[in-house]
Amino acid sequence: MRVLLVGAGGVGTAVTRIAARRPFFEVMVVADYDPARAEAAVAAVGDARFLAERVDAGDEAAVAGLLARHGCDVLLNATDPRFVMPLFRAARQAGAGYLDMAMSLSRPHAERPYEECGVKLGDEQFALAEEWAKAGALALVGMGVEPGLSDVFARYAADELFDEIEEIGIRDGADLTVDGYDFAPSFNIWTTIEECLNPPVVYEKERGWFTTAPFSEPEVFDFPEGIGPVECVNVEHEEVLLVPRWVEARRVTFKYGLGREFIDTLKTLHLLGLDRTTPVTVPGADGPVAVSPRDVVAASLPDPATLGDRMRGKTCAGTWVRGVKDGQPREVYLYHVVDNEWSMAEYGCQAVVWQTALNPVVALELLATGAWSGSGVLGPEAFPARPFLDLLTEYGSPWGLREQ
């Protein structure tokens, strides 16, 4: 397998360090708009299979050309969601497969944003599913940790743990702190603002997909391995749009353990209009300059990939499932916990970006060996879960199951 990895930020760099320990691929081309980042990621692994290139992720022709020049079989997208569609189209144009960790962006309903869906996450990609299927090509979408491993857990629960599922709820929580910072998100702030301030989507079998207000339906969820109780709220996320396509459940939700201070900060950004992506004109030394308020916020905060030495604690991604097995009610939480101290010592990557990067590498290996195969635009739950979970454990990062 020959891979083009686009994006050499925190997640992309973690991908290289995880993949370098595995033999399943022949070449991994690491491409970024900033060539120094790509070169640094390649230099750090010291492996001749890795090559550095410069590319603009928004330039479809350039990306397609890079795929062709290196004879790549698949494009792994490690950029933020703004670049999903150009990279998705570039892969199709070049005849390569495609894999991402976040899907095409949503747009709220114009009149009823907190009741009805407008353009949903992934709609633009699923609109082209037939084109991919006819070509016999695979776009594996939402294959990070959340979405990604959380979806694999949903598939596993449906196949092996339940006869009937009432509810699937993705629950994400952590006890991470960052020394020296009052506010320092552990993941890309552009993406965090997008998913937290958009109307959250809920799925119910009788109603289909619908939206609620941001941060709705708060609940306290007790996370494993010492993390403990964390208040979780509804957040827009891909699992709610993916799971019901392949897994039968009466209700699907995603709730994120953000914490009150984090929620208040996001609400303030929204109140001030600093979450907007539409450029505003501001005075500059050489005249007026158009800038995106959200980009300014992102540039003002520390790069999450650089925070590992200051971070303390664990992060947990998991899928809570409630239903019936053998005529009896059952409730479980399938989860994956990463301790930042361990990920820094073992890989030099902070826990959140390492946990995100691990899963697409596992998926690539399954595709390379033929354990997973398919065509069209498919989510992780379209594939058998057991091979993924077994290989995840082989990578040295086991998952857990807790009866509730």
Image (cartoon, rainbow, N blue to C red):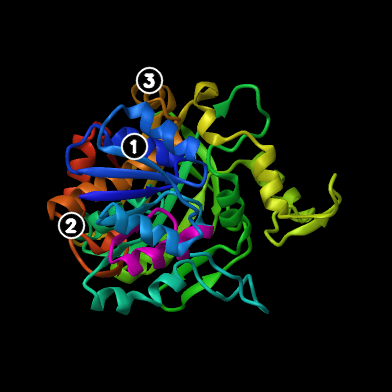
Q: Quadrant of residue 151?
A: bottom left
Q: How many other residues sit within 10 Å of disc 3, few (<14), some (14-19) or many (≥20)?
A: few
**Circle 1: residue type:** Thr
CA distance separating discs 3 and 1: 16 Å
Q: Which residues are magenta?
A: 82-102
- Of the residues under marks 2 and 3, which one precedes in the sequence? 3
Q: How many marks?
A: 3
Q: In this rendering, which labeled residue sits more in front, label 1 or label 2?
A: 1
Above or below: residue 166 compared with residue 330:
below
Going by the image, does 361 lie left or right of 341? left
Residue topped by disc 1:
16
Above or below: residue 266 compared with residue 181:
below
At x 28%, y 66%, the residue is: 95
Residue topped by disc 2:
372
At x 25%, y 68%, the residue is: 137
Q: Secondary structure at mark 3?
A: helix
**Circle 2: residue type:** Trp
Going by the image, does 211 lie left or right of 7? right
Q: How many other residues sit within 10 Å of disc 2, few (<14), some (14-19) or many (≥20)?
A: some
Mark drawn on residue 345: 3
Q: Main secondary structure of the magenta part?
A: helix
